[in-house]
Structure formats: C-alpha cells, structure tokens
Image (tube, rainbow, N blue to C red):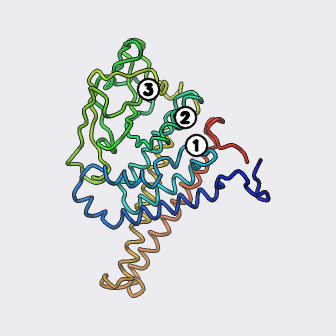
Amino acid sequence: MPTTPNTPNTTGQPSDAARRRALLRTARDVAEDLAADSVTREQAGRPPVDETARLREAGLLAALTPPRPGRGADWRTGCAVIREIGAADSSLGEVLARHYVHTWGGRFYAAGHRATALEEESAREQWLWAGAVRAPAPGGEADRPDLTLRPRSPGYVLSGRRPVDTAVAAADQIAVDAVCAVTGDVLVVRIPPGARGVTLEPAHDRLGQRVAGAGAVVFDRVAVPPGQVLGRRPHDEESTPPFTALAEPALRLTLCHVGLGIAEGALTEARDLSRGGRAHRLPGEDPDLFLAYGELASAAQTATAVVDRATERIPRGSPPWSRPPRR
C-alpha cells in the first residue's frame, strides 16, 4: 500500500524518516564512543580493526545501500553519518566515506541485477570495502597497467601492486581496476583480502590520518572468478557512460563531508575548550578570538550549504533501478 504523508505506514517497516533518525542517532552514539580515545588511537597508529568492528556492530557499514523496505538510506543520510563520524575521528570518517563509494561500485560499473545481488550480499555479510579505482584518463591518455589481468578459464588471474588509502588490513573486499593483457579492457574487480596470492602491506609511517589504515596490496596471480568482475571502466572521459561518470564525483563528495566533519569537530572542540575555562581568555573576553571563531564558523556553514546542495544532486543522476521505490 503506498505511503503518503497522510497515510499510515501499515507495512510493518519503519518509514524513511524514522530510519534516517535512527541511523543518525546511532552515528552520534558511535561518534561519542570514538571521540573518547581518538587521540590515543591516532598516536598508536594501529590498523583500524577494532574501530571498524564498532562501525559494523552499529550497522553503519550497510547504511548507504540503496533504500529498500527495511534497509538502506539515501545519500543525504549516508553523508550525514560520514560527517558525524568524521567530526569525532577523521580517519574513521575517511574509512567510511571510501567504503560507501566502493559499495556503490556495482551501481557505477555493473548491470542492475548484478549490482542489486552484490549489495544484498554486502549488507547481509556486513562487508567493509576498501580499494583504489582510478578515474578514466583525461584526453584518452593510455592507462598505466600497474595491475594486469590475464584470462584463465573461468575468469582471470590478477597481478601487480596497488596503493590503497584506507583499511588495508581490515577490509573484507578490495575493489581495484586492472588492464586485461589480451583485450586492453579496463575491468573493475573485487578481491577478498584472504584470497591466495594476496599480500597486504600496511603503511606504518603515514603522516596524518594514521588510523585510516593506508598501505598497499600485492596481487600475485590471484584468481578472479567471473562473479568478482564488477564491470568495465572506460579508458577516457569522453567514452564514459553517464552513470559511471558519477564514481569519481561521488568519492570527492564523500571526502568533502569528511572535511566538513573535521571542521565541525574542531570548532566544537574550540568552543568547549573555552567554555571549560581551560583557555587563557574566553572568546567573549577576547574580541579577536571571538571574531576568528565566528569567521571560521561562518565559512564552515557556507561550505556545508554548497556540499549539501551537491549531495542532493547525486541521487538524481543515479540509474533508475538504483533509486528508492516511490511511496
């Protein structure tokens, strides 16, 4: 039965608004938990295994699967979750942002039914995604085949080394693009980190965002069954289908929300620090400090307005079969 603002929801499932409120409450609770020891964890610089387990237990890993009855949320809600987590721990905000975009890899590169099946499995298994899929080369420039696929029935074998920005040692699926040595096609594939021939190289000396878990993955003739091939990535911008072209802007958009979360978290910390009397002078007693705080807060609000507008546009460019059903 269709649900309208004047019609009660009799399906037994929470409404979109109720699901959004519940997700944001959960994100705030997780953010408070992460903020309590964020400095200690950043100094330790260990892979984010425990931290991503907190995200998984809270159900946040499946938050941005396309909305369906009983699960998923829209881009606005998913990006709000990224900001909440990013304000508390910027490294975990980046992990979540890149994870959300990679979970949409099927939407960007695969056919509708395959994308839906992949999302169902990802949500059911609570997979954490990481990886590095490059944007098409501008002006038709040739791809640098740092990863190579060679056909081997039934599927391919993958070889090479690829830097990865987040969750190298914690991910359940790693999404990468590679050049087929025979056809020259660029294929996007997903690889379980525990697969034979996969070696993980966490970066222990990264400057900043240390808990994000950056590093590299080495693939030594790793078997890639046909079911792990998400689809083709065009060689250049001119031949990129409209839906596939959203992959790179979507990543940039989610990282903008990480940046906004960092700014909001810093402003909140500065405000609370002054209110707690730990500063030499309270903002109200120091006009220059008060003015600087106000200018920064205004700039953050302006950036938020611009990014929120872009966030509202992303679903409009999504394939029809990825949009939530009308109610």
Residue at the spot 59% in from the left edge and 32% down from the top edge:
242
- Are discs 3 and 2 less than 8 Å apart at CB? no
Residue at the spot 41% in from the left edge and 53% down from the top edge:
55
Residue 201 figure quarter: top left
Q: Count the marks: how many? A: 3
Q: Position of residue 146 (x, y in %)?
A: 31, 26
- Are discs 1 and 2 less than 8 Å apart at CB? yes
Residue at the spot 42% in from the left edge and 13% down from the top edge:
183
Question: Which residue has dot 2 on it?
Answer: 107
Lower position in the chain sequence, tag 1 or tag 2? 1
Q: Position of residue 181 (x, y in %)?
A: 36, 15
Q: Nearer the viewer, residue 297 or 17?
A: 17
Specify the farthest residue to the right. 6
Q: Amino acid at mark 1?
A: Pro
The residues bearing labels 3 and 2 have C-alpha atoms spaced at a distance of 14 Å
The residues bearing labels 3 and 1 have C-alpha atoms spaced at a distance of 20 Å
Q: Residues within 10 Å of mark 2 (few under 14, many from 20)?
A: many
- Are discs 3 and 1 less than 8 Å apart at CB? no
Q: Which dot marks residue 66?
A: 1
Q: Position of residue 128 (x, y in %)?
A: 40, 43
Specify the farthest residue to the left. 205
Q: Residues within 10 Å of mark 3 (few under 14, many from 20)?
A: some
The residues bearing labels 1 and 2 have C-alpha atoms spaced at a distance of 10 Å
Q: Nearer the viewer, residue 293 or 162?
A: 162
Q: Which dot marks residue 228?
A: 3
Q: Which dot marks residue 16?
A: none
**For the residue labelled by badge 2, is the local secondary structure a helix, a strand or a loop?**
helix
**For the residue labelled by badge 1, is the local secondary structure a helix, a strand or a loop?**
loop
In this view, 20 is above or below 120: below
Q: Amino acid at mark 3?
A: Gln
